Amino acid sequence: MRESTVKRLAETSGRGMDGPRRRRAIGAARALFLPWLISWLAGARAGRAETFIISLPVGGAIPIELSHVGPEGGLVSPGEPSVPPFRPPSIFSAPLPSGSGARALGLGAFTAVADDATAASWNPGGLVQLERPEASFVLRYSAHESRHASDDADYQVGRDEYEGQNLNYLSAVLPVKAFNRPCVVSLNYQEAYDFEMRFHADQLGRSSRREEESRQSATSDTQVDHFSDGVLDVTITSELTTRLTSQMRQLLQSDMLTDISFEQEGIIDAVSPALAVEVIPGLSVGGALNIYQDDLFGNRPIGSSSRASYSGASSSRVQTRDTRETTGTYTYEGTWTPAPIEIMPGIVVPIPPVPISGEGVYPPFSDSGSGGGSDGIVFDGEYSEENRFDDLHGWNLTLGGLWSVSRHLSLGGSVDLPWLAEAEQEQTIRSRETAYDASRTVVLDRSEYVVTERKDVEFRFPLFWSVGAVWKWNNVLSTALDVSQTRWSDFYYRADGEEKINPLDGRAYEANRLDDCWAVRLGAEYIWVLRATEIPLRAGLSWEQRPAVGAPDEFYGVNAGTGLSLGKDPGKLILDVAYAYSWGDDVLGTLVPEQEGLSTDMREHQVYVSCIYHF
């Protein structure tokens, strides 16, 4: 039966079929769609974490997951932070593998001079010049200033200042005879490496993300309806298909201000027994065994701390739209009972029911619904990474020689052999975050995460060599020159079970070795001889390279020093003081590896005071 037949049947019965059936079909489609919709909202629309990247020194880019409002208005909490790989303490500047003392600092160049107890660190061959037993100590004070500039307006940096003081050197010297040759033995303590560093920055983070999702599904249903009004007695079977299209648009915006701080401290020191012997008149050789440990006196262990304290706000605006379109076919069968025929008054002839059947197509029909809303939260939190090194130890040799070519010229050379430092490193990661409603009166969520891991680690410290010359113009005036190199290309760090890395930026060692670094130092000394004392006047200039990724940083320096001798032989007491100022512009390019356009101008001040007592 065609649609016109159905319409005639409906008209005959006095009831329309399209309206009721359409409403029933829509109801059936909604009943089938609702469970799927709930599942989709719970899964697909749960939202993914909002992530900010914080740039820390050496650690590089640290992803911080933040709480934010999901598409359905619920809070999406951050997951546990990822644990970064083990990293070494930073060596932003190159501490010399040898060299101590106020006299050496004031003069600058000391390899061919080496005429006090600190020769054990500069050139052990020079110890032979010490003719009487003596004891000495050296104190060091240092102050550093770093002026940072950034091309990124959202990464705000300024000036960092830090200072420190420490026992720099301690020695006891005893001249002896061996095989009828002059010899000198000494026992020394020396400060070898200093890891002091400070850095602060404010990072402003903005995030705006649009997400659009569209899903389609189809559900089918068979519906059976019976219609009877005394004229029509029909059973209608409908095959309905409802297609659902769901669309979601979300605009997620977050702003976060982060206060970043990095602090690093600690020293590596060494106990160094040394021996020097005169091979032939005017030529001496010597060596020192350096037994390294971290902070012998226990007040400056090696460690670093990176902290990022952040706060901000996140807002979510969501629009949704669901469209359902239903199509279908129907078949029917039943009987149609026409009205009786009245032949004459009082005589009615009934007409038997007429079988009817047929099929048809429903015209497509659809409806849609939309919704939306906006929510906001505020949050604050802190991320920290702390590294501590325990039981660092290692050893190497410092070898040197001194040759008095003439009464005017002396030549010297020394080599500080490479060495392996082994230690146990403890790394602790902490993450805390609290989310509030927009009025900051209700705590919506609080999360905290702590993980600690320990590993055996090793450093490969580089070889250092130096050659020098001193020209004695007369008994009171001399000039000295040193040229040295540090083989920083051999420097690496490795944690147990991990690959070697470049300690300056954390990248693979073999793919990103450092360049070797050179240094040139020139100094002069004038001895002002008075009746009761001698006052030395010392000055020097220096140029040196320090390790950096890409190309070494260049530093320049000026030195000055003086002293005073008290008493007469034997028992002379010598006091020395020295000041050194060094500077480097546009250096420390790897201070924050992930932050391009960051430059630093460094200024360093050092004051050494030494006391030597001759027995």
Image (cartoon, rainbow, N blue to C red):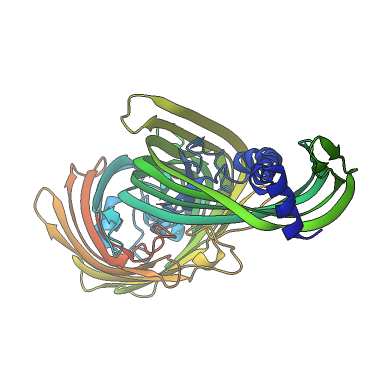
Horizontally, residue 352 falls left or right of residue 26, namely right
Across and down, in percent, residue 111 comes to 38, 64
Across and down, in percent, residue 514 comes to 50, 68
Across and down, in percent, residue 404 comes to 38, 70
Q: How many marks?
A: 0
Across and down, in percent, residue 451 comes to 57, 34
Query: Is 120 or 444 nearer to us in this picture?
Result: 444
Query: Is 476 or 466 nearer to us in this picture?
Result: 466
Q: Is residue 135 above or below residue 557?
A: above
Q: Is residue 94 above or below residue 71?
A: below
Query: Is 96 or 149 nearer to us in this picture?
Result: 149
Horizontally, residue 279 falls left or right of residue 610, namely right
Q: Quadrant of residue 512?
A: bottom right
Q: Quadrant of residue 165?
A: top left
Residue at point 38% right, 36% down? Answer: 379
Residue at point 91% right, 43% down? Answer: 352
Residue 256 appears in view: yes
Q: Quadrant of the N terminus?
A: bottom right
Horizontally, residue 308 falls left or right of residue 394, namely left
